[in-house]
């Protein structure tokens, strides 16, 4: 039993959270790249000095990094114990982006700093930031046709980029010699390191106030309470076996769908996740490394039970069987650039689809489930320099028992948001011709799905290459309990009089574009919740008045007859349509 009084525990817990939040803010405010500075594609956290387990993570960080940063820290500790990686000293910062060592894809670069207090190592401070480029076959790293990880970019095992507080010029030179726009990365590197130093100062102040013994005891109690609270929620789920599937469009090389098949067993206060029926390893970049697979389950459960304080205790009741022999357990040299941004979201979708059967009042229909990864790399003659633009986008959320889905929400894996178009237009030679709500894209249901996004960007000058790794182009986000699927992802490249649609629908690379060419992307809407014919006719009328659906689409999808210029509901005709759903659908 803890000897801490509740007030001290609350103060320390919130203090640790604040340390991580300040690291998040420092990272975004000082980063050079818009994907970090504007889109917040990053995360910061505190990890146990011996086990590497998660202690706290910033509220503004990507949930998908919750598990991967823990696995990465654990791996660094193991490699130090094995003598493979040099042991830590005060002032050191390790850099690592190897996907197979507790990572995601190569663009997510992790820093880990041993934190010392009064001469003793107290914990690890770590963060991850998405670098716009780490080399590889295509600008931005999203090679849709990669068949081995070396084609995706520079792979770094844990090495000390900073030694006793000084940056290692030789390690930096190796990195800069293998990536595009190398001169601009130094800004992100210094921002990433600065965020850790901000955390070190704030954590030192916390330890000065409360002492290491009190903070250590608080950390143990936080872990115990998170475990207990998560178990209490799981215990309320009816025991049983629930099965679900989610589909990945293709691997980018072989034009065939990949299946994520989940068997979820609820027994008492534990959940058992078995993905062994999923598709085998694939040739293209849609394999998922094991740390990302685990983290995808963690983030899905946190979506469902968001009020459980984050720590390693949250993961204790979640038993995930390693899916050996499937594309969810990628081994070297399988390419993995799509794992964190796309496959992780299909894994979460499978978890949602399984648990909505058991706790329908808590779980939503499927969200858009794609980060919309669009990379454009080229040369800007007006500025006499090269560039790599990385664009991510949101989409619709799934409907739920109480509400329609959120429109143009962040991707399932995090709270990162699309960069403002004004910022992208300032940095890069592009002009956004359209950036709008994708009307009609929400899946039909008693609670309809939220709407996706539609944008069109024109290249103003210079030659460039466009690459895409997206998903949900073959099938849309699935509805729940009779709801319809959301609209599917669409990509179109307009070059003069030619319209080009990728053969794999949501994945392609090295598409040459020049001045006047345009790229059009339509992101998915969320799945609908419950039968569409149960939606209130007045809610359908409001949707039509707001331009979300045409009157014709509303009649077809929801069996609601609208009459007159004021879009009044023809109640008699609506009752007749709903009495014969087949007639309405036709």
Image (cartoon, rainbow, N blue to C red):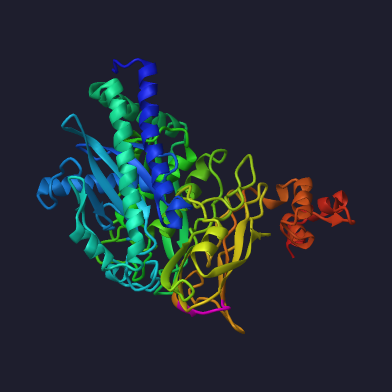
Q: Is residue 386 positioned above or below 266 on the image?
A: below
Q: Position of residue 227 (x, y in %)?
A: 35, 31
Would you say 235 lies left or right of 83 here? right
The quarter in which the C terminus is drawn is bottom right
Q: Position of residue 290 (x, y in %)?
A: 30, 54
State the residue at coordinates (39%, 74%).
253
Q: Position of residue 191 (x, y in %)?
A: 35, 49
Magenta residues (range) = 511-517
State the residue at coordinates (56%, 49%).
365
Q: Quadrant of residue 387?
A: bottom left
State the residue at coordinates (76%, 60%).
550
The quarter in which the N terminus is drawn is top left
- Report the number of numbered marks: 0
Near-viewer residue (288 or 187): 187
Would you say 360 lies left or right of 272 here? right
* Res 62 seen here: no
Q: Is residue 233 positioned above or below 457 on the image?
A: above
Q: Position of residue 485 (x, y in %)?
A: 60, 58
Near-viewer residue (349 or 221): 221
* Res 22 seen here: yes
Would you say 466 lies left or right of 11 here? right
Q: Is residue 101 positioned above or below 173 on the image?
A: above
State the residue at coordinates (36%, 34%).
19
């Amino acid at each position: 039993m803890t000897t801490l009084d509740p007030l001290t525990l609350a103060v320390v817990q919130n203090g640790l959270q604040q340390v991580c939040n300040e690291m998040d803010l420092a990272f975004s405010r000082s980063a050079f790249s818009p994907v970090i500075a504007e889109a917040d594609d990053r995360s910061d956290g505190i990890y146990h000095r011996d086990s590497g387990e998660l202690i706290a993570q910033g509220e503004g960080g990507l949930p998908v990094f919750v598990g991967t940063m823990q696995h990465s820290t654990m791996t660094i500790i193991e490699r130090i114990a094995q003598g493979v990686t040099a042991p830590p000293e005060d002032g050191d910062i390790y850099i690592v982006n190897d996907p197979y060592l507790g990572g995601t894809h190569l663009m997510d670069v992790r820093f880990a700093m041993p934190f010392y207090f009064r001469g003793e190592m107290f914990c690890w401070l770590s963060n991850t930031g998405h670098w716009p480029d780490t080399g590889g076959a295509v600008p931005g790293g999203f090679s849709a046709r990669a068949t081995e990880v070396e084609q995706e970019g520079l792979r770094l095992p844990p090495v000390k980029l900073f030694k006793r507080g000084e940056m290692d010029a030789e390690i930096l030179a190796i990195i800069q010699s293998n990536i595009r726009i190398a001169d601009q990365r130094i800004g992100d590197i210094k921002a990433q390191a600065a965020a850790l130093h901000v955390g070190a100062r704030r954590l030192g102040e916390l330890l000065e106030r409360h002492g290491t013994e009190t903070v250590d005891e608080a950390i143990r109690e936080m872990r115990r309470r998170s475990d207990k609270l998560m178990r209490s929620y799981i215990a309320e789920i009816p025991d049983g076996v629930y099965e679900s599937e989610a589909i990945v469009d293709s691997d980018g090389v072989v034009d065939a769908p990949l299946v994520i098949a989940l068997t979820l067993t609820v027994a008492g206060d534990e959940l058992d996740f078995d993905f062994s029926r999923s598709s085998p390893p694939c040739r293209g970049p849609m394999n998922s490394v094991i740390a990302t697979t685990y983290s995808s389950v963690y983030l899905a459960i946190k979506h469902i039970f968001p009020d459980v304080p984050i720590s390693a205790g949250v993961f204790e009741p979640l038993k995930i069987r390693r899916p050996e022999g499937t594309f969810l357990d990628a081994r070297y040299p399988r390419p993995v650039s799509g794992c964190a941004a796309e496959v992780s979201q299909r894994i979460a979708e499978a978890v949602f689809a399984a648990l909505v059967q058991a706790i329908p009042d808590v779980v939503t229909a499927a969200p858009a489930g794609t980060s919309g990864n669009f990379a454009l790399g080229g040369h800007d003659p007006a500025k006499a320099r090269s560039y790599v633009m990385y664009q991510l986008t949101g989409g619709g959320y799934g409907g739920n028992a109480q509400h329609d889905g959120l429109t143009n929400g962040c991707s399932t894996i995090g709270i990162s948001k699309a960069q403002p178009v004004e910022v992208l237009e300032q940095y890069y030679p592009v002009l956004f011709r359209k950036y709008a709500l994708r009307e009609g894209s929400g899946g039909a249901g008693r609670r309809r799905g939220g709407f996706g996004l539609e944008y069109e960007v024109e290249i103003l000058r210079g030659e460039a290459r466009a690459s895409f790794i997206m998903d949900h182009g073959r099938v849309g986000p699935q509805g729940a309990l009779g709801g319809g699927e959301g609209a599917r992802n669409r990509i179109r490249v307009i070059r003069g009089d030619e319209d080009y649609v990728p053969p794999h629908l949501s994945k392609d690379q090295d598409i040459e574009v020049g001045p006047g060419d345009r790229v059009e992307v339509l992101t998915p809407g969320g799945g609908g919740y419950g039968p569409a014919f149960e939606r209130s006719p007045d809610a359908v009328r409001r949707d039509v008045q707001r331009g979300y659906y045409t009157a014709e689409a509303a009649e077809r999808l929801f069996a609601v007859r609208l009459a007159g210029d004021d879009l009044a509901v023809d109640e008699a005709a609506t009752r007749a349509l709903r009495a014969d759903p087949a007639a309405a659908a036709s």
